[in-house]
Amino acid sequence: MTAIVFYFQVHQPYRLRRYTFFDIGRNDRYFDDTENTRIVRRVAEKCYLPMNALLLSLVEAFEGKFRCSFSISGTALDQFEAWSPETLESFQALARTGCVEFLAETSHHSLSALFDPEEFRHQVSSHADRIERLFGKRPRVFRNTELVVSNDVAAQAERLGFEGILGEGADHVLGWRSPHRLYRPEGCERIKLLLRTYRFSDDIAFRFSNRAWDEWPLTAEKFASWVHEVPEQDRFLGLFMDFETFGEHQWADTGIFEFMRHLPEAVLRHPRFRFWTPSELIDAEDPVARLDLPHPVSWADTERDLTAWLGNRMQTAANEALYELGEKVRELEAAGRAEFAHSWRRLTTSDHLYYMCTKWFADGDVHKYFSPYASPHDAFIAFMNVLDDLSRRADQALKASATGAET
Amino acid sequence: MKVLMLGWEFPPHISGGLGTACHGLTGGLAHHGVEVTFVIPRSYGDEDAEHLSVIGCNEIVSSRTGRGRTEKRGDRTSSSELRTETELLAETLEVAEALEAEAAQDEPGAPHVLAVDSPLQPYLTPETYRERLDQLRREGKLAAGPLPLTQEARRSLAELRRVLSELTWGEGPVQAAEWTLKWQERFELSGAYGPDLMAEVARYAVAIGELSMRQDFDVIHAHDWMTAPAAVVASRLTGKPFVFHVHASEYDRSGESVNQEIRDLELLGIRHADRIICVSHYTASLIKRRYGANADRIRVVHNAVTHREQRERFDGAKAIEEPIVLFLGRVTFQKGPDYFLEAAARVLEIEPKVKFVMSGSGDMLPRMVERAAELGIARQVHFTGFLRGKDVERMYAMADLYVMPSVSEPFGISPLEAIALDCPVVLSRQSGVSEVLTNALKVDFWDVDDLANKILALIRYPALTEQLTEEGRTEIQRLRWEASAQLVLGVYRELAS
């Protein structure tokens, strides 16, 4: 048997307002609620709601033979609760079928695993609690932000009790090995690593509507025929992608919904194939070998590394300044002043660093990435201004509580 | 490919970016084997031009009158030939500078001098033209008193403008013989500088008309409005195609209060040109919108940077601790100096220790000095006046950041110069250079708060300065005149085929 493991990433960041120097010390409204509301409602309408309706109908039509999994960031959940409750309900409806698994991740789509282990534990545990509360089951499988995984990240997840972790099936990590088997990262004892098959995943996520692609148009039948060519000893295919692929990155008029509507039937026509969730896979399969991931690997760009978030001086400076603040805000949080940590955690969302990426400048293709800012430099300035203000406020609060404790 | 190129200035005698751009472009064209003859209104003889021949209109010899000077510049004072009134006048202007320049340009084949001198410069307006004449008088380079124009000469200039106007706005071919006849008559009668700017532009066109019939070239390439009539005349006399290169328009310089005569000359060039080269998409769009230019004939060729093998280092140029924020350019409406000062006032509310430097001169300078006082920031704002050559580079090296808040900037080469000297830039989005430069902070010129915010960010966040200067250096390495010239050559080839 060969399993198809669908995993969809659902995330929305809290985009910042155009926060200028003149706001510092005067204004602690950091986030652009108008824009964030607008975007989450638009994506709900184009992607979340129609796609969840489609998935629900597929699960019902195939009586449990179609299965898939999600992870939803805490910032996205916050926005659904505030501005699009029907989206949250549609995910809960999927959870109730028992055929859709919800994985763990960091609450704030952060890179804290790499820079602040204490914060990482906090974000992962609190988010796992919330997932359990909302969707009825405690997550057993962890997916780190942007699929960033290394020996060390996997070990941290293992210590937090997770049995499985998702990762990128990057060529430079696998070498001659197949991405279609489970592995165990070096230094780990129990956790199982499920890798993404980027070729099949990107056929759907990136190439689907590309008319210059020689396989365009991609039909469910054609895709299923490729899946059926996978040799029998391959245990699974990891199809991991942004959920926004459906209706937002690939618009409805590209036929992406029709593709998904017909895919289960086309895949299941061959009796060797079935759909599984990550937990079902790790219950049934064991790792075939150890895999050494000394450096973090992500699912981004062709480099599959961290350079989209930490590739230039602005990004490293912003990241350093960000995590320098962690201890202070947690101290305040412990003392009952949670508002600082609340804002700070929203700043740990990796999208803020991503907006500062200048990688595409070299190609002269500045318009390639999606960002609320006119330029990466503008993103840096707004972020640093906010951080400056938050840091000042935190210092003042710490000072005030110190003097308060003395008297 | 041989090109007759009509320009207004050439390094080192420049008053703005036009000369720098022409120098870079001709260097790039030379790289592709294009032979360029560059004509400027007045040549000093020490133009930085190993790669092309520079001819001043004051060097144009009339083969027909036989009165042209053939001696080298230094011999001029000893010449016993008969001279026209114009020649005599020109000599009063040029002798001092010529002698000074003599040592530097003593190579064989140095330009011949004919005294059809002209005080024309880029960025002149009818008003500043008069000021320029006044200035020359004050400096003793021009006889005091009213313009040395006889009634006869004045009449002939009026006649000249009429003839020229027929030529440039008329239709159909022009007989070279007829033109020459007219030209000779007028030229010998007319003397001295034109009584006004437009007469001077016409006189320049006459000289180019004459030159065009004696030069061998395939294409005429004219830069900006002052050369438009000359290019049209040359094109109609020789039947050679004409490329009009728009570096700036009257709408950039003057906003809505345009000088109608200048606009007319721009329109003349745009209507008659076989191809229009714009220095940016920004300018191409303006030319289409404001002059109804036909998009099919427009080509965009961005300016580039002259890469020097070794730049002089200005280590230790900065002697003070306070951050220095620099404005460098003509202090005119177009360059937005007022927005610079308004932003300065905003910055100083937050960071009282910043120094603001305004380098350059222009008609808005007195007003700016007053404005700084009104804003209560006079102690933090320094005015250096006009800087040239090394002083410009030293100023960039001293500055912590450079601001170009132009209201309308067709290209704007100075941010590239600043980056080459490790000075990060904040520039107006209403500029052509913002189309090619990604490693710069960009603002809408009217958004003073955003400008102040970005100035403060550069002062406070060193990572931003490092990012912009390090990446910027790499980026400007890719902006090469050879590449721009390649595009220009493509335009020539379109016309030659």
Image (cartoon, coloured by chain):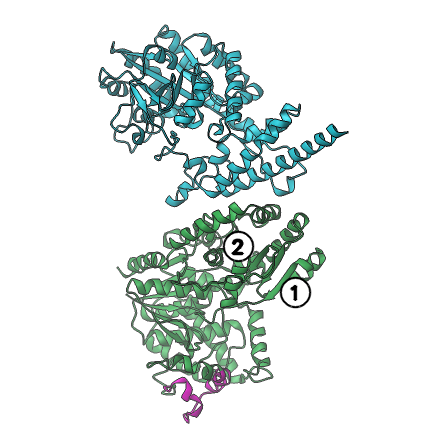
Chain colours: A cyan, B green
Residue at image coords 41%, 65%:
B22
- The N terminus of chain A sits in image quarter: top left
Q: In this rendered view, identify the residue nearer to me: A18 or B256.
A: A18
- The C terminus of chain A sits in image quarter: top right
Say if residue A294 shows up in the picture.
Answer: yes
B478 is within the stretch colored magenta: no
Magenta segment, principal secondary structure? Answer: helix
Q: Secondary structure at mark 2?
A: loop
> Taking B495 as reference, is A369 left or right?
right
Residue at image coords 47%, 21%:
A105
Which residues make up the magenta segment?
A: B70-96
Could you tell me how many numbered marks the image carries?
2
Say if residue A375 shows up in the picture.
Answer: no
Pointer 1: what residue?
B366
Image location of residue B322, percent across then percent down? 62, 55
Image location of residue B219, percent across then percent down? 32, 65
Image location of residue B396, percent across then percent down? 52, 60
Query: Most extreme residue toward the right, as rendered?
Result: A407
Q: In this rendered view, identify the residue nearer to me: B124 or A389.
A: A389
Q: Amino acid type of disc 1?
A: Pro
- In the displayed structure, A212 sits above or below B94; it is above
Q: In this rendered view, identify the residue nearer to me: B46 or A98.
A: A98
| Quadrant in the rendering for residue A302 | top left
Q: Which mark, by number, is residue B408?
A: 2
Q: Earlier in the sequence, mark 2 or mark 1?
A: 1
